[in-house]
Image (cartoon, rainbow, N blue to C red):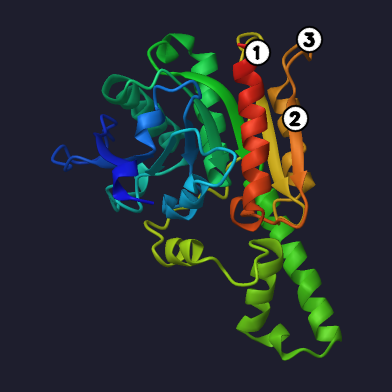
Amino acid sequence: MPSSDYKFGTLLLKRTIPSLQSNQPPLRIAYRIIRPSLLQGTKAPLLVIHGGPSLPSEYLETLADNNLAIQNRSLILYDQLGCGWSSIPQQDEWYGVKQMARDLRELLLHLRENENVVQFHLIGHSLGGAIGYEYLKHKLEAPDEGRDVPKCLTVTLSNASTNFQLSDSERDRLFGEMQKQQTQLHQESSHNKGLQKLFFLKHFCRTDTIPPVLTSALSRRGKDWSAKEYLAKPLDSTICRVYPPILIIRGEYDFVTEACTRDWESLLANDDKSVTAREVVLKDCAHYPHLEQQHEYAEVLETFCSSVEDNN
């Protein structure tokens, strides 16, 4: 894609850590807008939150391909603190799901003030789904803090677990099953790195070879921090009565299994059950469906986003 179709920007974070020294250098979040000329068009932009921790957002850039169903929208990508083109402070205090959700709010305020973004569709992939949910939860439970941010039209939680310990357990269970199968077949790969690759190509990315954008992102992981204790808590239904439509996407073979996503509906349901999360399971996909079934993934997103826009 020509460089003219990109707009790059940085946000100077206001978030501080009181326990750290006051001479902490300024921290920046780097973002880019793909197809910025469409920001003020009839279709709201997609703001996509990458996974990780600290997996740079470059692996999501294939969503910007011009032959996809979402080609008439701007795409906003950013690198979370700790990776990519953003600042990478080494102190652990800067990191965590809720900390990243606060950074997302700062980014949205910046986008409204500097890029005239007034509404958007939020898509969180993997860990990005947890960050997106925590942003939504805080915004709805503390509405006064969310008045100045752009309007969130929809939320898509893609390959996102409600319980990271559970998804780790599911990954280990699936790996153990594959290891047992390979041992029974007397495959040497059960004792070397070959099994790890087989597992990745079955339960992470079901492509013939690992896509270069994903290989590059994996090789450029940033700050090593852990989100394994994350457990999504329900929205306070006494406060949160009106919120955006929710779409859950997972892959048929994802290590983030149905057991890891089934609780989203109960977490998001309000008292009268009028708001529920819709789930789509993409066939022959694992954890990176935007790379495995690129066109189908984009069509699901566009259908969902357009249906909400058409009804507004």
Farthest residue to the left: give it: 23
Amino acid on which disc 3 is placed: Asp
State if disc 3 and disc 1 touch (CB < 8 Å).
no
**For residue 109, what is the image quadrant?**
top left
Q: Position of residue 24 (x, y in %)?
A: 18, 42
Q: Which residue is mark 3?
A: 272
Q: Position of residue 186 (x, y in %)?
A: 81, 90
Q: Secondary structure at mark 3?
A: loop
Report crowding for label 1: few under 14, some 14 to 19, many 20 or more residues within 10 A (C-alpha): few
Dot 1 or dot 3: first in sequence order is 3
Q: Compared with residue 257, is residue 145 higher up or lower down, i.e. above or below?
A: above
Q: Secondary structure at mark 2?
A: strand
Q: Secondary structure at mark 1?
A: helix
Spatial separation of the CA atoms under disc 3 and disc 2: 16 Å
Amino acid on which disc 1 is placed: Asn
Q: Which residue is mark 1?
A: 311
Q: Quick one: 224 or 47, which is closer to the camera?
A: 47
Could one spot residue 20 in this view of the protein?
yes
Q: Residue at x 61, y 42 (%)?
A: 298
Q: Position of residue 250 (x, y in %)?
A: 71, 46
- Which label lies toward us, 1 or 3? 1
- Which label lies toward us, 1 or 2? 1
State if disc 2 and disc 1 touch (CB < 8 Å).
no
Q: Compared with residue 109, is residue 2 higher up or lower down, i.e. above or below?
A: below
Q: Which residue is mark 2?
A: 278
- Looking at the rendering, in which quadrant would you find the C terminus? top right
Spatial separation of the CA atoms under disc 1 and disc 3: 21 Å
Tell how many labels.
3
Q: Compared with residue 167, is residue 119 higher up or lower down, i.e. above or below?
A: above
Farthest residue to the right: give it: 184
Q: Quick one: 91 or 1, which is closer to the camera?
A: 1
